[in-house]
Image (cartoon, grey):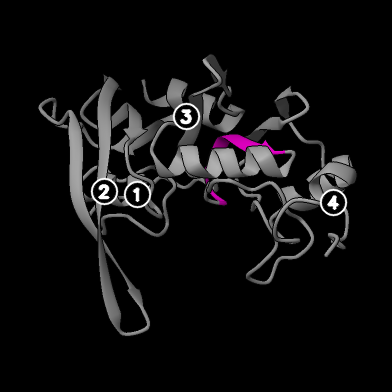
Amino acid sequence: KKASLKPFDFKLNIIFEDDDLIVLNKPAGIIMHPGAGNFDNTIVNALIKYDKDSLSNIGDELRPGIVHRIDKETSGIFIIAKNRKFAQLFTSLFRIRKIHKTYLALVYGKVNNSIKSMRDELSYYEGNKKISQKAISNLKILKSNEGFSFVELNPITGRKHQLRKQLLKIGNPIIGDDKYFLNDRKKIKTKNLMLHAYKIKFMINNVQYNFKARYNESFKNFLYKIF
């Protein structure tokens, strides 16, 4: 079935494009694909407007070319497959953990220097059934003071809201996170989540791909303000 989505007149921030893939820098606050009450203002709608011929032939009409996940609130790097071959290839590379992502986050509090990785059992519910999944992320402190830390994160597994949940568990929730936060801390008012997908790297046919997405002005201004 061909995609019949309403085009979204939104300028995509394209970092790289060839015949097989598009690499985007997604802004915070825009969802990737239609659903949950929003069927118009999504990255997929903008992609359909940009390249309907390629993308309307790939997979689910509401998620053409979408091979991984990024939260609405999170900004940063995102891969779109432009054909079925690469959609299947990326899906399998993600499944066998051969795609390596690096995130940057601004968090509350001074992160403990001894924490180099976070290993957790994260739970969620499907109906009444509780499901637990192992979550592993590596962590590196880039800057910190008594009030805040600037950290680099490498998720090894890919669970929903993994980094947000894990940072809350160690007592350092992300600034701007209205879902995973500590009540005893005075929250800074910001409409943006200070979590950015910064880099992605993978190998296809012995060719190494490395892409980087600059963080936005809001993230940059917070960084200057707190350090």
Amino acid at dot 2: Ala
Q: Which mark is residue 135?
A: 2
Horizontal and vertical percent for residue 17? 74, 25
Amino acid at dot 4: Phe
The magenta span reads 72-81
Instruction: Characterize the local packing of mark 3: few (<14), some (14-19) or many (20 or more) Cα atoms within 10 angstroms.
Output: some
Say which residue appears at 64% left-offset and 43% top-offset: 87
Point out the tag, 3 or 4, that comes first from the N-terminus.
4
- Along the line of sight, which residue is nearer the eye, 54 or 191? 54
Horizontal and vertical percent for residue 180? 34, 56
- Residue that badge 4 annotates: 8
- Residue that badge 3 annotates: 222
Point out the tag, 2 or 1, that comes first from the N-terminus.
2
Question: Looking at the magenta stretch, what is its main secondary structure?
Answer: strand
Tell me how far mark 3 sits from mark 1, CA to CA: 23 Å
- Compared with 70, 110 (above or below) is above
Say which residue appears at 87% left-offset and 63% top-offset: 4
Horizontal and vertical percent for residue 76? 57, 34
Whether residue 184 is visible to the viewer of this picture, yes or no, is yes
Say which residue appears at 24% left-offset and 24% top-offset: 145
Tell me how far mark 2 sits from mark 1, CA to CA: 7 Å
Tell me how far mark 3 sits from mark 4, CA to CA: 30 Å
Amino acid at dot 3: Phe
